[in-house]
Image (cartoon, rainbow, N blue to C red):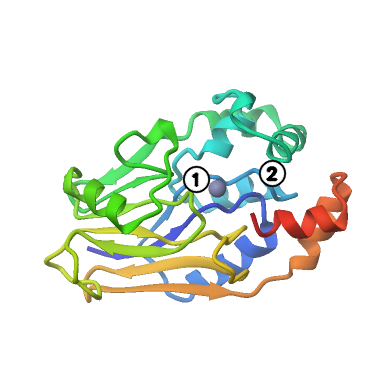
Amino acid sequence: MPLIALISDVHGNLPALEAVLKKIDSYKPDQWVCLGDVVGYGPFPSECIDLIRDRNIPTVLGNHDAGVSGKLTIKHFRDPNRRLIQKTQELLTEEQLHWLRELPVSLREEDYWIAVHANPIEPLKWGYVDSAIKARNMLHSIDAQLCFVGHTHIPFLVSDQIGISGFNKQHKYLINPGSVGQPRDEDFRASYCIIDTDKWELKIERVEYNTEKVITGLSKMGFTRGESHRLLRY
Ligand code: ZN
């Protein structure tokens, strides 16, 4: 099995995406997976979609992608997210909205891995896998060794068995690479994950990026500086 690069929850944050892609490129991964929410929150949704499409990065549908493209009704979102979804729609072409709408709900590679945005059991209910107990229960009903999820914006690695530390061949794992564009674990640097399935090594890494460009972009969308700072965090 190859070297896999995982990214998730870019949320229209182009400076963060560019910084992450540059770092990941130095690993020369064999396979990339984007776990959805390419858009929503950040001011550069169109540029992020184009960059991911130019690189042919396989991508699953996130709840914000579904909201922006009209696949999920806007009543599922509260302000300021609802306002952001409407603003994001204005920044995208009909063709880009179509691309979002057509994203697959899940991707898989034989029995090796399965990828979804939120929850592998009921992917379109967008439930959060936010505890080790939930993650472990899910692993027991999944027929793949690795399960990749995003959605919580918090990186984690959970094995199918309590007391297993590290990452090794004998176990199943649920892996969340954290968020590129809006991390929610008090470390505001962009997050991504590299998995080497030959050596069974996993790294979740962080990279700094220019947040000022994002703040400026959000103020052009009509958000105050205070709102913009908050939008970078949750
Ligand atoms: Zn998200």
From the viewer's perspective, tell me whether residue 2 is left or right of residue 67: left
Q: Which quarter shows the N terminus? A: bottom left
Asked if disc 1 and disc 2 are in contact, CB closer than 8 Å, the reply is no
Q: Is residue 177 above or below residue 149?
A: below
Name the spot of residue 118 as percent of width and height, x first: 42, 44
Mark seen at residue 46: 2
Tag 2: amino acid: Ser
Name the spot of residue 52 as percent of width and height, x first: 55, 50
Name the spot of residue 146 as percent of width and height, x first: 25, 56
Judge by depth and name the residue closer to the eye, 91 or 144.
144
User: Within 8 Å of ligand 1, the CB of disc 1?
Assistant: yes
Q: How far is mark 1 from mark 2, CA to CA? A: 15 Å
Q: Which residue is mark 1?
A: 36
From the viewer's perspective, tell me whether residue 150 is left or right of residue 134: right
From the viewer's perspective, tell me whether residue 151 is left or right of residue 54: left
Identify the secondary structure beneath mark 2.
helix
Task: Give residue 182's quadrant in the image.
Answer: bottom right
- Mark 1, other Cα within 10 Å: few <14 / some 14–19 / many ≥20: many
Identify the secondary structure beneath mark 1.
loop
Judge by depth and name the residue closer to the eye, 213 or 41.
41
From the viewer's perspective, tell me whether residue 87 is left or right of residue 109: right
Name the spot of residue 65 as percent of width and height, x first: 57, 37
Q: Earlier in the sequence, mark 1 or mark 2?
A: 1
Tag 1: amino acid: Gly
